[in-house]
Amino acid sequence: MEDSKELIFISFSKDKTGEVAQILYDLLKSVYSPSSPANADVFLSSESLSAGSFSQQIHDALMLAKCGITILSPENAVDSPWLMYEAGALQNSVKLNGGELVIFLFKRHRDNVEAPIKGLQYCEFQNIPDKDYREILKILKYINNLLLVKCSELHLENVLQKHWVHIYSRFQQIDVEMRDLSMTSDAPKTAATAANGSVSLSAAKMNRYSTEHQRYIYFENDFAASSPRGLEGMFRKVLDSQIGHDWLCQNKEDIKYNKHRVIVNGTRISTFVVFTDGYRMVLFNRLRDVENTSVENDRYDVFGSVAFENSSIKVKLKSNSFLDAPILKIEPIEGAAIEANRKKSNSEVETAVMFGLCVYMSESDIDLAKLDTKKDEIEIFEISSLLSMKEQLTSKAELGLAHLVNGKLTK
């Protein structure tokens, strides 16, 4: 990569999507070869990084980029908060440099695109040869038109025609091999469940309804508790007004918690709350408070709601100052978290599907969450630091993190 050249940055995550990125990288390198009149270069992390700090090199390339391509697929629709972070940074930098970001959708529908890049220019692979040829040519023309010194359209077409048979053959092979991790039953969630793990479906676009009666469960517009302590009444309203009583059962195993659990066809439905000031996130360290942790999963967790089942907001958060502090804003968290937790009492594995709310408070009030703890079990983390801690988070916490990463980039 030469600093004097206009830079085209290709952004992706996950293995198979990386193969798509490699195809586009090879094609663009052929278009902008040393004999090309355009003074352009292409950055792809798997090809362009040299010895040294990888994160610094990626950051520098992001800042220099004139054009960007972000590749979205079903494979990276799940569990890829860094991709959205990188895409948001890329979108901002190319605009500052007088360019644009284009989104290449590979087996991913445009309705399933997250903020901050929702609504940008799209090209997509449709597994229809003539249409796919035109889509790839559209990417080449779009990128080329953003450069100060351009190649001729005839040159773009000649290069694409020369390599098209190989390109399309590879696309078709990846199309067959790529699994939709948000939908398939043999995705990593199965293996993780067996190991007492969890998975976030942060981009699964799951509607909140029961498959038995097709009855929507939603948080109404007046879900507006004034403080964390007031969340109990809001969740109680949902429980009483929208949950069928035949789905409720007594929680006999743990008398410290609310009596009700919601069980639908053997699956526990639950909710959770993420407390944040927009830049930090409050987490519960299960290892430091085993008394209030009823499962063997020892990861950092957010807070179970009240009245739906576990009253863990007031069980795990001891600070009355925090519980009575004002809430600034409440947002629904898109998607669902799935956890399979092995109970300490009898080693039974219980699967739960959980929907969440993000509760915003001021920086000073968020700090109050750590008061009155006995074992420093409440910790507050910068969002950026949590990106490297995903293996230590429950699926609820990870889903909340993805929501905050996307939200921070759109502010």
Image (cartoon, helix red, strand yellow):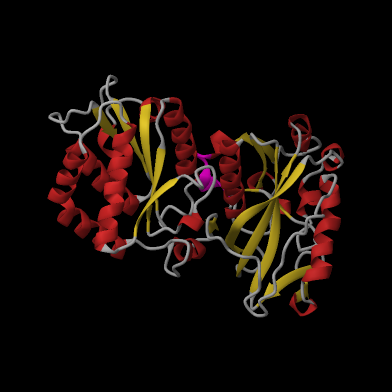
State whether residue 182 is above or below residue 142: below
Q: How many numbered discs sit on the rendered protein?
A: 0
Quadrant (top left, top right, bottom left, bottom right) of the C terminus: top right
Q: Please provide the residue range marked out in magenta.
A: 387-393
Q: Is residue 19 visible?
A: no
> Looking at the image, which residue is at 74% across and 76% down?
247
Q: Is residue 123 magenta?
A: no
Q: Nearer the viewer, residue 381 or 120?
A: 120
Q: Quadrant of residue 66?
A: top left
Q: Quadrant of residue 376?
A: top right
Q: Quadrant of residue 186?
A: bottom left
Quadrant (top left, top right, bottom left, bottom right) of the N terminus: top left
State whether residue 386 is above or below residue 53: below
Residue 365: % across, % down: 79, 33
Q: Residue furthest top?
A: 4
Residue 57: % across, % down: 36, 27
> Looking at the image, which residue is at 16% across and 44% down?
159
Q: Is residue 388 magenta?
A: yes
Q: Nearer the viewer, residue 161 or 167?
A: 161
128 left or right, relative to 369: left
314 left or right, relative to 342: right
Residue 372: % across, % down: 81, 37
> Looking at the image, which residue is at 78% across and 44% down?
317
Q: Nearer the viewer, residue 6 or 265?
A: 6
Residue 169: % across, % down: 20, 59
Q: Is residue 212 visible?
A: yes
30 left or right, relative to 4: left
